[in-house]
Image (cartoon, grey):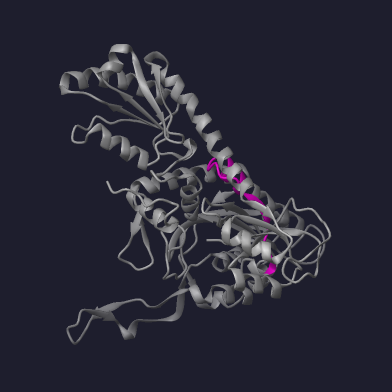
Amino acid sequence: MAKLTSRSDDYSKWYNELVVQADLAQHSDVKGCMVIKPYGFAIWEKMRDVLDGMFKETGHQNAYFPLFIPKSYMSKEAAHVEGFAKECAVVTHYRLMNDPNGKGVVVDPDARLEEELIVRPTSETIIWNTYKNWIQSYRDLPILVNQWANVVRWEMRTRLFLRTAEFLWQEGHTAHATKEEAVAETEQMLRVYADFAENWMAMPVVKGVKTESERFAGAEDTHCIEALMQDGKALQAGTSHFLGQNFAKAFDVKFQPKEGKMDYVWATSWGVSTRLMGALIMTHSDDKGLVLPPKLAPIHAVFVPIYKGDEQLAQIREKGEAICADLRKAGLTVKLDDDDSKRSGWKFAEYELKGVPVRIAMGPRDMENGTVEIARRDTGEKELVPLDKAAAHVAALMDEIQDKLVNKARTYRANHTTKVDDWDTFKDVLENKGGFIEAHWDGTPETEDKIKNETKATIRCIPYDSIEEQGKCVYTGNPSRRRVLFAKAY
């Protein structure tokens, strides 16, 4: 088992090695795409299942819409097509044929599509064309629909989970009778994402609104949650968009209110993706491998017997099976690893690499003393615990580890959030400390672009909890009414 590059030596290389060595994902032979391996997919499944339950608790239902979108649909909302045009994969033909010159398979020139199809980069257009047939009156509203799907945004410079040409996500698309309902929906779903990030991923986030230049293409407002990774870079972990009536107008989706004339429907969309896997890895993991919050760990605890000979193994296995049974009754997923083809030291390193929250080990001396050794993945602490208390102890550790991880991440964020009032300090903090910078901005896209071009820092959001205060823009010195959040970002 190869040793991971340390985070301090090369954070990017550490991340890439960890994703592969922990058996989460690998690059595909299809350039820009990835294979999510079973262990990685098990974590994603947990995320998906929790989020799906949260969506349903807020009244949403799942549906599915086509992977292919007629090209003409994309051109109906000008800002939308402009935002995605450079990332679209286009299907032009529907059949292959043998090359007449004997050089394999070629596209059949007689099989060109009458209208080219876009492989979905997002589904607003196909969904709003569908909603036109679903909505006639106020009785048909609201529509609260989510879909779990894959999307394609053509990327050639990729990083597993963080940026790939194809990725998995969910996208909510809702329709409302009033602007107020749509705005409330936008804000509600961002709160759902923040709840999931903090209480399940143990990843604190800042809730806020994007600047005009950072909005989703076709949105009137984009709300976001921003997390801070261990290398001091920000990661946008989820977005919720108030779309106004833009897509309703583009696809002529009107409804008859209780009173008054026909009006256009109000819309939202919102989504998170497998990018959350990257966020999870970079928020908690260390130089030994993954560190997973128990609420999302595929395996909560592993029992490893240490023995010589089949007789000892049978005796220790019996004790281990009893502990595992008690843990399963407590709702935990547990594995007893009695594979005799691997040494216990190898197993310890393997489960450490994979981020299993708790390791339980028992050898002959432990069996004589009626104890087991319990090791925490998050702190590395080990302790001997009586056999009859082992299961209760491990179960109690789950909440303790979950809380410890989120508090550690909050402390890191607090220590790497800096108020800055002048340009030289801004550049110094960005270069030597990193993290979030709270600074005044004069509100113009020109200044935003200049800061980005000179430092690679972007305005991550205008935080919900930012207060109005008189100040001067950190770059131009022009008047400013509030601080915004800057950072370099993934």
Residue 209 position within the rendered picture, expressed as x and y whole percent measured from the top left: 69, 59
Judge from the rendering whether residue 166 lies leftward or rightward of residue 177; answer left or right. Answer: left
Residue at 70 percent across and 75 percent down: it is 446
Residue 307 position within the rendered picture, expressed as x and y whole percent measured from the top left: 22, 23
Q: Quadrant of residue 208?
A: bottom right
- Residue 58 can be seen, yes or no: yes
Residue 24 position within the rendered picture, expressed as x and y whole percent measured from the top left: 37, 50
Residue 361 position within the rendered picture, expressed as x and y whole percent measured from the top left: 32, 25
Residue extending furthest toward the right: 470
Residue at 35 percent across and 20 percent down: it is 372
The magenta stretch spans which residues?
192-212
Judge from the rendering whether residue 182 lies leftward or rightward of residue 165; answer left or right. Answer: right
Q: Quadrant of residue 252?
A: bottom right
Residue in front for this viewpoint, 125 or 137:
125
- Residue 487 can be seen, yes or no: no
Q: Is residue 233 above or below residue 378?
A: below
**204 magenta-colored:** yes
